[in-house]
Amino acid sequence: PPPPPPPPPPPPPPPALDRSVSGSATDDDHGDYWKGETTGGTTGGAAGGSGISTRGSQRTRSSELDPETIKYRDEQRRMDVRRSFTKLTESSLFQSWVHAISSEERMEALERVLKATSHLISYAQGMNYIGAIFLLEVGEEDAFALLAWTLKQRGLGVLYAGDCQGLLDYCKFFEGMVAVEVPEVHKHLQENGMTTLIYGMEWFTTLFAVSLRQDLSLMVCDLFLAQVDDALMRVGVAVLKVAQPELLSLESEEDLLMNYKQVS
């Protein structure tokens, strides 16, 4: 008989995002931005840089954008603050969470945290959910420090780059891991036009906040903040493994697009 085919090659190493890096969010790093004071020069991070490999354009600070772009993103941010709570309200998995944070006061607090963070890295959709998670556990200033550290020192800001190259690269690396760890699911999704970008964009840019139960999404945040290597990719693979029977039972692209969120 012919020899068995060789095993698939291991996936390439992921970019610096999700890898342990030095640096921490301190009052010295981010205090001026929280107070609303914008200054020039570099911001935050360890000496010599933030330790982030962008593999493409890094998202700029709001202070570096033209006035019209700043106005548009400010309006988008304010809409997203309310939209995020509305979306969570529609999810039965988050009823207790929404009850705790959907007040006008909480939304105003989230708006202030996101606006302050925009002086470090301009706002993009997805950051609102992460900021809301942090506000569940800590006060505004600590939530801002955590969000700033997550985006800069932990490297999550790479995923929000204007040209999307960071997100595309990250999903490509994740696809390689899925092909090795859950090959049947990978083949089934690829054959039906479900690329990792379709579901990975929401997973990774919100730290699974709108994709998992409240308790699980908080655990994902813990893993990420604890600098566990490849935490987001490993959680994504685990979700696909658990959901494998249901995903394989969805036999068309339409079924997958309509039901993959409920299944996963």
Image (spheres, helix red, strand yellow):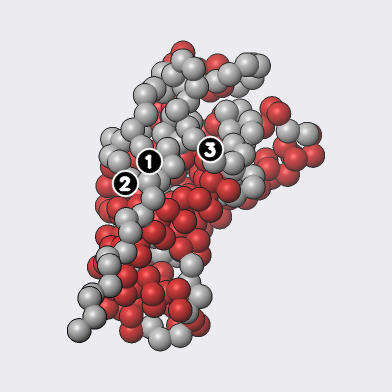
Mark 1 and mark 3 lie on one chain; the one further toward the N terminus is 1
Indicate the amino acid at tag 1: Asp
> Mark on residue 167?
none
Q: Which residue does the numbered mark 2 point to in the structure image?
A: 231
Q: Which residue does the numbered mark 1 point to in the structure image?
A: 18
Secondary structure of the residue carrying numbered label 1 = loop
Q: Is residue 184 above or below residue 130?
A: below
Whether residue 237 can be seen here? yes
Indicate the amino acid at tag 3: Thr
* Residue located 31% across and 64% down the image: 8
Secondary structure of the residue carrying numbered label 3 = loop
Mark 2 and mark 3 lie on one chain; the one further toward the N terminus is 3
The CA distance from mark 2 to mark 1 is 6 Å
Whether residue 144 can be seen here? no
Do the numbered discs 2 and 3 sit on residues whose CB atoms are within 8 Å? no
Q: Quadrant of the C terminus?
A: bottom left
Do the numbered discs 2 and 1 sit on residues whose CB atoms are within 8 Å? yes
Asked where in the image residue 35 lies, by quadrant, the reply is top right
Q: Which residue does the numbered mark 3 point to in the structure image?
A: 54
